[in-house]
Amino acid sequence: MSSPSPARSILEACQIRSALWLHRSLVATMAWVIFISGVAMGQQVERYGDIPADSVAIASIDFQKLKESPQFRMWPWEVLNVACLEQFGFALDDIETIDATVSMPSSEPEFGFSIRTSNPFDIATIADSVATGIEVSPKDESLRFRGLYELPMLRIAQKDPNRVLVGTQGTLRRMMSQRIKTGGKIVELVSSRQSDVRVAVNLVQIRDLLLGLWMTQEQQVPEMFRGDIENVIELTDNLLVELEASDSNPIRVSFGTASRESTEKLEESLQRLRTEGLQFARESVESQLASEPSISDAMKQAASKYADRVQETFSDTSMWSIEEDRLELKTETSMMASYQTIGVMTGLLLPAVQAARDAARRMSSSNNMKQIMLAIYNFESAYRKFPERVTRDKAGAPLLSWRVAILPYIEQNNLYQQFHLDEPWDSPHNITLLERMPQTYANPQVEVAPGYTVYLAPVGKNAGWLDKNMRLSAITDGTSNTIALTEVAPHLAVPWTAPDDLDIDENPGTSWMSDRGANVGMFDGSVRWLPAELAEDVLRALMTINGGEVIPMLP
């Protein structure tokens, strides 16, 4: 083969150089176009690009799609749009999407919103009556902030003309940081779905917290449900709730797991919770109906038949579908109750709803007692002894209750300082403070006179609380086996400042409890539920601090 001529080599070299020059010119031109477009429009962050990967929960709303849905056709969008313009200075019509992030809870809630608009928006147009003046970042003049008068914990931030961030200061800082990692499993979940509203919760991050809360409350739940509830917490990695307003399957709930095996185990637990829960609710309703003399037998039979139909409908196993690592609950329109049916069901299930409210109030009372026990132990830690159950004057006359002594440890130091500690609870000065009882001493389950409490300490022979200088070492029966505090029936309530408590010799057995039982605080700081059927000798043993009794396993 003959070698190419010098002229041809020079020609080819020129062609190559021309091609390279043209290529570089095109690249440079495109780069400038992109740069100029970015300057003109503001450097747009892709959707979810400001959502931290370690978010505990994410909510995503395609606002425009939701507005255009037939199900929301009758909403007064025109009125709402004008109201937003007049009161806040922005148009509701301009909002395209809203994405929210919730961070791991700390001393205060941490959350933020990324709001994208279809038209450029300037936070300077927000009404001055709503937001504070514009602040400019000293490091980046294009980044501006405003505060909110009504919600001082929130701030508004803007760098891009079509994106506004609103949130707590810590979350805003993370959403705007270039170093924060974005994306992650739950971002993938919400971004891969096309439904109008998506909410995803990362349960892996808060599983330990949920299990801890569950351990404190499991005694309040019927035993038949406890194992399955714990399984749901341990097996579920994430939860996704979707709303598709224009679909025949408007609400979808799905549970994400680590594997197919975990999904199948989760399905078994959820199925048992559903079927046994429906049966439990039905039995509760029928029990309440049977005990109500004003309801006719015919109405009771009709309610029972309706309960049969509801139970049969919602026990249908076809409501579940399983993928590899996901279990989805189907809620087709035919399965969803109409507004009228919901009203009828609410009426029929009212006793069960009341029972649920009672359980919530009982839980609230339990939380009050935990705060009180923590305060007692903080007092003991500070003074190396428990607070005196009754403070006394030099002559030995009773003055004030232990409930006054621990006020500084339930964040009520200002109230504590207003007491005259050398005067009795009903002195002309101290009696005026009776009406200022802290909510911690109020049991939401019962109605008592204002300023009265049902949280009492047991007193009597060898009973839980000595009058003076009681130390931890005095509880030889064990702190987890000895009652320090209890809630009593309303007729035994006392003024919260008065040096009065529960005399177990005058109120033997469970006569001081409500019909069902009572929450009690143990000297180890825990709170337990004791049923009213508890044997008298066992209860007495729990009240003594040094009786040496053998206490059987409690329910």
Image: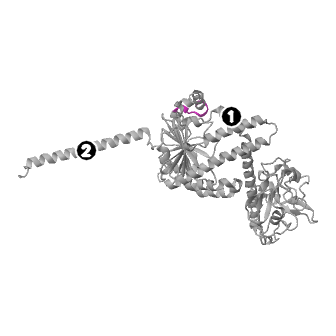
Q: Which mark is residue 443?
A: none
Q: Which color scheme did the rendering employ for the protein?
A: one colour
Question: In the rendered structure, does residue 89 fall within the stretch colored magenta?
Answer: yes
Residue 335 percent across, percent down from the top left: 58, 37
Residue 158 percent across, percent down from the top left: 51, 42
Q: Check disc 2 and give the amino acid type.
A: His
Of the image marks 1 and 2, the number of the one nearer the N terminus: 2
Depth check: 208 or 541 in front?
Answer: 541
Question: In the rendered structure, does residue 275 fall within the stretch colored magenta?
Answer: no
Q: Which corner quadrant holds the C terminus?
A: bottom right
Q: Nearer the viewer, mark 1 or mark 2?
A: 1
Q: Which residue is mark 1?
A: 343
Question: Taking 59 as reference, is 441 above or below it?
Answer: below
Depth check: 376 or 504 in front?
Answer: 504
Q: Check disc 1 and give the amino acid type.
A: Gly
Q: Which residue is mark 2?
A: 23
In space, the residues marked 1 and 2 are separated at their CA atoms by 70 Å
Residue 242 percent across, percent down from the top left: 54, 41
Can residue 360 be seen in the rendering of this structure?
Answer: yes
Magenta region: which residues? 85-94
Labels 1 and 2 touching (C-beta < 8 A): no
Quadrant housing residue 76: top right
Question: Taking 391 as reference, is 5 above or below it?
Answer: above
Residue 416 percent across, percent down from the top left: 81, 56
Secondary structure of the residue carrying numbered label 1:
helix
- As drawn, the residue found furthest toward the right would be 395
Magenta stretch, main secondary structure, is helix
Can residue 91 be seen in the rendering of this structure?
Answer: no
Question: Taking 314 as reference, is 84 above or below it?
Answer: above
